[in-house]
Image (spheres, grey):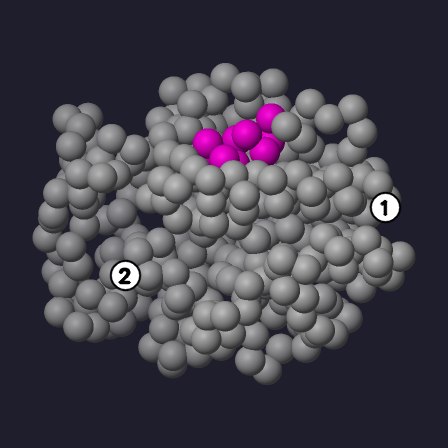
Amino acid sequence: MIIITGAAGFIGSALLAFLNEKNFNDIVLVDHFTNEQKLKNLAGKKYSFMVNREEFHDWLDIHHSLVQFVFHLGARTDTAEFDLDLLNRLNLNFSKKVFEQCTEYGLPLVYASSAATYGDGALGFDDDESICPQLHPLNPYGFSKNEMDKWVLRQPERPYFWAGLKFFNVYGPNEYHKKRMASVIFHSYHQIKNNGEVKLFRSHRPEYADGEQLRDFVYVKDVCKVCYFFMKNRSRSGIYNLGTGEARSFLDLTNSVFLSMNLKPAISFIDIPEDIRNKYQYYTQAKMEKLRRAGFTDDFTSLEAGISDYVKNYLLEEKYY
């Protein structure tokens, strides 16, 4: 039996689809199953049953002997969320309890961290665990994720295998419900469909031209591959980056969306909203050597190939993964 928390969300539901493709169907879904749009992510997929998030800890106390692996992907993922009590409850305290239970019951665990922990990138994007206490995230979401990483590293007892995955800019199918927090690919597609052009954020730093802000964009299917790798290979516990190792510009991204829609690019620029301007990352690029040393050898999907698959097979077709 495999557990996925956040199972109705973007990455959780994609992982469910990926595991189904690998013929893993005895899967327990954990989430807050009230959002009808998120429930569409689960349609047609195979799983054993659902457990409400608020009941999960008690459920695991009772049924832990049946569990072989835990993917803890559930979190409040809004980078513009400033309710610290909410973030502490969902991203920190809930995650601590999952970690403690996995430790107590001898369950292997993969949990979701975030590249938001790196802040403005002043210390680089190296998943060397010794720098975690020195990182300064730019928003409360990133802070909550880094607090979890630091707490994990302080624990004298841990699951026999565990991995914290620092997701970079993940994009792909099943993010329809994420609204403002959906990927730039998702928003670009709908801007083109509705208005014929894309509005990108203007640069407010002189060293970056408009649209030349750089991010490490990783396709959700590659994220699933890495999660699956750790389920099958449990030799090296630790915190790992999960990007591609290549930073690409928003102009590259947007031009690829237009190309996938067989349209000529039409791009304009708008100011970054005031509430996130001072917390905006202009550059991210994951160092991926640690994951490679752990034995993951698959190539990552190029930005162009990932966008082409996403746009042509999911957005244009209005399909889920």
- 239 over 77 or under it: above or below: above
Q: Secondary structure at mark 2?
A: helix
Which mark is on residue 295? none
Magenta span has 93?
Answer: no
- Residue range corresponding to the magenta coloring: 142-150
Q: Nearer the viewer, residue 104 or 253?
A: 104
Picture coordinates of residue 165, whole percent (x, y): 59, 41
- The residue that label 1 is drawn on is 105
Q: Is disc 2 surrounded by few (<14), some (14 to 19) or many (20+) residues within 10 Å?
A: some
Picture coordinates of residue 47, whole percent (x, y): 70, 74
Give the residue displayed 30% in from the left and 68% down from the top: 260
Q: Secondary structure at mark 1?
A: helix
Give the residue displayed 75% in from the left and 56% down from the top: 58
Q: Nearer the viewer, residue 259 or 94?
A: 94
Q: From the image, give the main secondary structure of the stretch colored magenta.
A: helix
Q: Do the residues under discs 2 and 1 have CB atoms within 8 angstroms?
A: no
Name the residue type under label 2.
His
Name the residue type under label 1.
Tyr
How far is mark 2 from mark 1, CA to CA?
A: 42 Å
Number of disc labels:
2
Picture coordinates of residue 277, whole percent (x, y): 22, 35
Q: Nearer the viewer, residue 309 or 98?
A: 98
Q: Is residue 291 visible?
A: no
Determine whether, in the image, residue 275 is placed left or right of residue 41: left
Give the residue displayed 59% in from the left and 62% down from the top: 31
Picture coordinates of residue 201, whole percent (x, y): 18, 45
- The residue that label 2 is drawn on is 187
